[in-house]
Image (cartoon, rainbow, N blue to C red):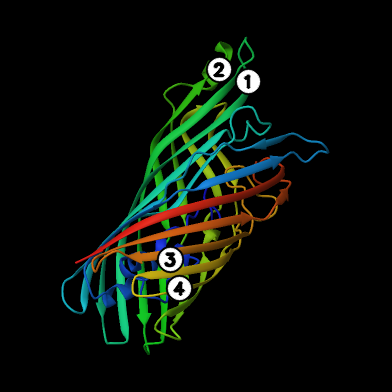
Amino acid sequence: MAMAGGYQVNLASQRQIGMGHTGTGLETGTSSIFFNPGAMSYLRQNGVTIGASGIISKIAYRAPEPGGATAEADNPLGTPFQVYGVYSISDKLKAGLGVYTPYGSTVNWGSEWNGRFGLNELSLEAIYIQPTVSYQVTDKIGIGVGFVYAIGGVNLQRSIPVQTANGEYGKAELDGNASGIGFNAGIFFKPSEKLSLGINYRSKVEMEVSDGDVSFTNIPGALSTRFPSGTQFDAKLPLPATLSLGVGFMPTEALTLALDISRVGWGAYKSLRFDYSQDVNGASYAENARNYEDAFIYRIGAEYKVGDALALRAGAYLDQTPVQSGYLTPETPDADSRGLSVGLGYKLSDNFSIDASFLYVNKKERTDASDKSGGIAGTYKSVAYIPGIGLNFTF
């Protein structure tokens, strides 16, 4: 599942993960394509970065009644990745391309738990492709903007409360590809060698599914006309805008401190709706309220250079949940998140370096009636362990 508020995945750079995923007010190298395109103009060399993380997540559920049933999601390993490349057109003008995964969610509850009629399994994928340009207006100010084309898909499976003669429940599966467009813009300000500031805005991307496939299995013959084969669906899912402010402070040449504050526009997510090409169980669409609220993320991070080759990093963050009381669902059983991270960087040569990070995420235990969203009432608890590695090459 996504290890941030809602279905956002904040794993855009192994160096920055080690620093609590700060970076809006820093020169972050090629990953400035994501964190602040304005800082990309300060790169002194061309560069390519390739990195990935592994999300090992655990989600537990307990039904609300005393001694109620329990369940644990059997989630696969999540593998968000990032690829960045930057090339100097001139001393002041840089061009870059980023391919990264800022949103996604995978959760698998199976077909035996007591919430199976709400959800068995959900997979949401979103890959951003972002060509970017950045210009250094003065020695102290850089600006940048990138166009975002997002591709991805959704697969949702749930049981249906009808049974075959041998007692098997029916099953519905919705599967479709999605796409959307947006932008990423930033301004980077460096008034001195010790202080830097940044502002970054990543726009909302409306992911649209057209003519997705709906399939039904284990439907009794007498009900087959209510669950017709060949049904398709359309849907929209907002990937919300994020506005970030960041500060970097370098009290010594060896030490870098960072602070980021982000506001995520989750208020754009009002409902989850699927429009069908033909009636399913007597209805032309299915819709459940979400009514997310905008939320803040607070981050701190530090990097200390032990020598010319080795850098040590640490960070922490608090990510507020956008999910209101009464709207908790098993697709994203969200709560306020606390994250702690460590990392290191090692320079193997003048042109090649490696970054490693480890992030621990602990979401608060949360009990919810889920009476406004069609969710499954009960208590949810989530944690995640996220190692990652990245390779950097400059030329």
Q: Which residue is mark 3?
A: 16
Question: Which numbered disc flags the more N-terminal residue, 3 or 1?
Answer: 3
- Pick out the residue farthest to the left: 90
Structural distance between the alpha carbons of marks 4 and 1: 57 Å
Residue 310 or residue 282, whichever sits in front = 310
Which structural element holds mark 2? loop
x then y, percent, for residue 42: 28, 77
* Residue type, mark 3 in image: Gln
| Residue drawn at point x = 26 percent, y = 84 percent | 137
Relative side of 319 to 25, left or right? right
Q: Which residue is mark 2?
A: 219
Q: Is residue 371 visible?
A: no
Asked whether the residues under the numbered discs 4 and 1 touch, taking CB atoms below 8 Å apart as contact, a structural biologist would say no
* Residue type, mark 4 in image: Glu
Which structural element holds mark 3? helix
- Pick out the residue farthest to the right: 66
Q: Which residue is mark 4?
A: 303
Q: Which residue is mark 1?
A: 162
Disc 2 crowd rating (10 Å Cα; few below 14, some 14-19, many 20+) is many
x then y, percent, for residue 174: 47, 33
* Residue type, mark 1 in image: Val
